[in-house]
Image (tube, helix red, strand yellow):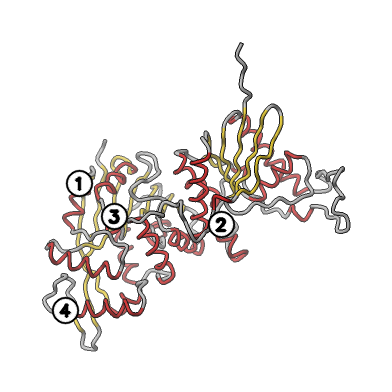
Amino acid sequence: MGTTEPQITHILFVRHGQSLHNRDGASRSADSGLTELGWQQAHLVADWLGRSFAVDALVCSSQMRARQTAEVIGQQLGLRPEAIAGLNETQLPYWNEFPSAPDDPLAWWDQPWQADVTSAPLYTEFRQSLRSAFAELMRRCLGQTVVVVSHGGTIGTIVRSLFGGHQMPIFTENCGVTHLVWQEGRWRLVSHNERAHLGDAGLPALVPWADAGPIRNVVEHFRRMAEVAPQTPTAAVEGQLRALRTLVAPRPGDALLDVGTGTGAVALAFAPHLAQVTAVDVAPAMLERAELTRLAQGAANVDIRWANATALPYDRAAFDIVVCRDLCRYIPDLGQLFTGLHTVARPGGKLALDELIGSENPVKRATHQALEMQHDPAIARLYSESEIEQRVREAGFRIERAEAYDAALELESWLADSALDEGAQTALGEMMRASIEGDPAALRIQRGKNGAIHFTQRRLRLLARAASR
């Protein structure tokens, strides 16, 4: 007769990536999102888990930093994370209840301290909550490999409880992994706080932007831009955001996806007017900037997430509204972008764009593109109005309104808002001045009476609806 292989359950605890609260302390909300480093850590642990394990299930706490980390892992594993509030970190200062023996390092060698409601009421309350959640998880996932994205206190408390000694604090670093195995009636600790997968944080060899290409260009450029981008939108941008919101006319119950959120300006402009906003970007530095602004404005209905605009990790027909502002020029293949946006928009749902455009004259557009690429080296291509509209229609949208409008800019301010060094700014300024005569870039560059250089960019504001599938 054949023998039955023993049932094995693998539990892979992952502490979330570095959060703003981890880095900055009490000046940030305890339930803050990830820093730029935290997003990078999430990608590194996701890559390692995907290469090392055949994972059956992915769960996380319901707190922001854990959900953000879990969604990155889920994209790598092809799994949708399930949030379980019982795995949340507690704010109760239970650690103050742990005993100490300053003069005897072996005080609990044979008699481990056991917490109870009398000696440690806060710790006991926390443990009881975790026990219920963990027991349910084991009941549902017995015999599977499960990734659990949670918190240092949660992981440490579960490990202490399983091994029967509560006096020792157990520390897990951001995106450290603790591997537990349940087999033949015993728990086995395979590893704790494993971090080799994180490598050198300065060498992101396994993140999606490691290879040369459009994503890497965007990530590197906006790492620099995050340091110089205005903390709040300029008056001109505020006006553009109001016009975009008026065009979209959001309803209170709508769910909106902001693709290429950058500093989060679009997401936060819409947030007071609808139920839920999901804001995604590929640049971790900009996700950190967006999260800082979200916290400052108290926008609880905005979720900041990492996602590639051309490979969105969302269900078909998940959103009522999809918005892109200043995204198209970073995308080499607009057809791929708009096809993906059509997939996540519900039938009849809205697509709204507010984009920089080039001239319909290909020569002028090429000249304009060359100047813009000097200002922003992450640009892949500058599109004309007709090119964008054509790709929108081909993806299955019906355009309801499209309006090109002028955006007036002052040269020195435009240069100062870039991430260019002083020499590069000077060189680009000379190129712009040389373009006054003949207007080869269709920017209507002019010198004012005071000597200041002004020019005009053309932008496209567009509203379309997803056709029924």
Which mark is first along the chain, 1 or 3? 3
Vertical position of residue 190 compared to residue 216: above or below: above
Image-quadrant location for residue 112? top right
Instruction: Give SS at disc 1.
Output: helix
User: Do residues under tags 1 and 2 come within 8 Å of each other at their CB atoms?
Assistant: no
Residue at x-position 25% and y-position 51%: 334
Which image quarter holds the C terminus?
A: top left
Q: Position of residue 51 (x, y in %)?
A: 49, 41
Nearest to the eye among marks 1 and 2: give it. 2
Residue occupied by mark 1:
393
Number of residues whose C-alpha sits closer than 10 Å to that of mark 3, classed few (under 14), some (14–19) or many (20 or more): many
Direction from residue 61 to residue 399 in the image, left or right: left
Q: CA distance from mark 1 to mark 2?
A: 41 Å
Q: Quadrant of residue 59?
A: top right
- How far apart are labels 2 and 3 at the CA level? 29 Å
Left or right, 465 with reference to 96: left
Q: Amino acid at mark 4?
A: Ile
Compute the Cα span from label 4 to label 1.
36 Å
- Considering only order in the chain, which callout, 4 or 3, is on the residue closer to the N terminus? 3
Three-letter amino acid code of the residue under disc 1: Arg
Could you say whether the residue bearing mark 4 is in a helix, strand or loop?
Answer: loop
Q: Is residue 126 left or right of residue 241?
A: right
Q: Which residue is mark 4?
A: 436
Q: Earlier in the sequence, mark 1 or mark 2?
A: 2
Of the two numbered discs 3 and 1 in the rendering, the one whose residue sits closer to the viewer:
3
The amino acid sitting under disc 3 is Ile
Out of 295 and 373, give the one closest to the viewer: 373
Mark 2 Cα within 10 Å, few/some/many (few <14, many 20+)?
many
Q: Which mark is residue 314?
A: none
The location of residue 453, given as percent across then percent down, is 23, 81
